[in-house]
Amino acid sequence: MDYIHQASYTRHTSWEVFAATLAAQGRRLVLLTTGGAVRHDRFPFAPGDTIMVGRESCGVPPDVVDRAEARIRIPMQVGARSLNVALAAAIATAEALRRLDGFPQEGSEDA
Ligand SMILES: C[S@@+](CC[C@H](N)C(=O)[O-])C[C@H]1O[C@@H](n2cnc3c(N)ncnc32)[C@H](O)[C@@H]1O
């Protein structure tokens, strides 16, 4: 992608380092999982929330599920197993940005 430089990202050396960083920054870990207790469109997202998705093949291990402050699901049709991971991430991130008014401003249109 020729626009990857517009994204900022941090690579953590381990799960433990990642979890400790979130705790130190006071950020909630919000896990996307088909077993989530709360629908993504009813969840009260807050600034600083970190949305996590699992592996396409097997989701996340149980200790990661337990560590999450919240577990949310995207409603699906009865009988559907799960969504593609990138699609799930996009749906939840877009909902959080919409609710927190976090999308970029676009000049005169939003002035
Ligand atoms: C293809 S799914 C993983 C399927 C895996 N067999 C499992 O049971 O977790 C990949 C990731 O996408 C996310 N995901 C997919 N569908 C979802 C849904 N309906 N609600 C919430 N998260 C979903 C979850 O983070 C999941 O770990």
Image (cartoon, rainbow, N blue to C red):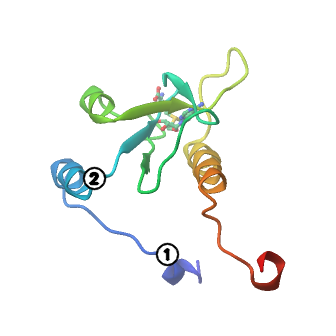
Where disc 1 sits, the SS reads loop
Residue 49: percent from left, percent from top: 42, 51
Q: Quadrant of the C terminus?
A: bottom right
Can you say which quadrant of the picture contains the N terminus? bottom right
The spot of residue 61 in percent (x, y) is 30, 31
**Is residue 103 placed above or below 111 in the rendered structure?**
above
On screen, residue 56 above or below 99: above
Q: Which residue is at a point 39% across and 70% down the rendered structure image?
A: 9
Residue bearing mark 1: 7
Asked whether residue 59 is in view, the answer is no
Residue 42 location (% of width, % of height)? 61, 32
Q: Is residue 64 visible?
A: yes
Q: Is residue 84 left or right of residue 55?
A: right
Q: Relative to 66, does residue 16 appear above or below in the rendering?
A: below
Helix, strand or loop status at disc 2: loop
Q: Residue at x 68, y 25 (%)?
A: 76
Is label 2 in contact with label 1 (beta carbons under 8 Å)? Answer: no
Q: Residues within 10 Å of mark 1 (few under 14, many from 20)?
A: few
**In this view of the protein, which residue sits in the foreground, 12 or 84?**
12
Q: Which residue ends up furthest to the right in the rendered image?
A: 109
Name which quarter of the figure residue 75 lies in: top right
Taking the image as shown, residue 62 lies to the left or right of residue 94, namely left
Residue 26 is marked as 2
Q: Which quadrant of the view contains residue 52?
A: top left
From the viewer's side, name the closer residue of 86 and 45: 45
Name which residue type carries label 1.
Ala
**Marks 2/1: CA–CA distance:** 22 Å
Choose the circle earlier in sequence order: 2 or 1.
Answer: 1
Specify the amino acid type for callout 2. Gly
User: How many other residues sit within 10 Å of disc 2, few (<14), some (14-19) or many (≥20)?
Assistant: few
